[in-house]
Amino acid sequence: ELIEKMVTYARLAKKEGLIALEKEDPGDEFSANAIRYLVDGYDEHLIKEMLIKDLRLTVERHTLGKNVFKGLGDSAPAFGMIGTLIGKHC
């Protein structure tokens, strides 16, 4: 599906120019950024660097969130045991 979208965008750009892509809504932020960079006339190497950076930052953000929840999950049994001990003595 993604490949078909990109082929459609390439045909549109070839037929009507890159500015025609401004009207397109790819449905996801990553593709929208890529199209915006093309329309704005950024160099292909700069576009590649910016998109790679965006992917890297997204992965880092998701990894951080995952680690927070993993830490909470790892701590849950200890909190349960503490609650059990406190509950017995109150």
Image (spheres, rainbow, N blue to C red):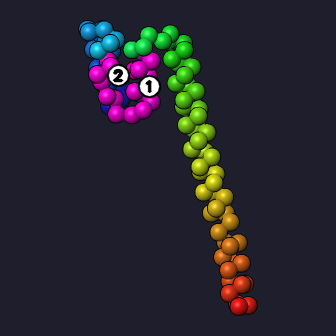
27 drawn magenta: yes
Visible in this render: residue 7?
no
Q: Which amino acid does label 2 sit on?
A: Met
Residue at which label 1 appears:
33
Residue at which label 2 appears:
6
Q: Give the range drawn in magenta.
A: 21-38
Disc 2 on helix, strand or loop?
helix
Residue depth check, mark 1 versus mark 2: number of the one nearer the observer: 1
Q: What residue type is labelled 1?
A: Asn
Q: Residue 50 carries which label?
A: none
- Locate the N terminus and report the quarter of the image it occupies: top left
| Depicted 53 relative to depicted 75: above or below | above
Query: How many labels were placed on the picture?
Result: 2
> Is disc 1 surrounded by few (<14), some (14 to 19) or many (20+) residues within 10 Å?
some
Mark 1 and mark 2: span between their CA atoms? 13 Å
Q: Quadrant of residue 35?
A: top left
Give whichever of 46, 11 is nearer the camera.
46
Residue 43, percent from left and from top: 50, 10
What residue appears at the point 61 percent right and 45 percent down from the top-left corner? 63
- State the predominant SS element of the stretch in magenta: helix
What residue appears at the point 29 percent right and 15 percent down from the top-left corner? 20
Disc 1 on helix, strand or loop?
helix
> Is residue 72 toward the left or the right of residue 32 in the image?
right
What residue appears at the point 58 percent right and 27 percent down from the top-left corner? 53
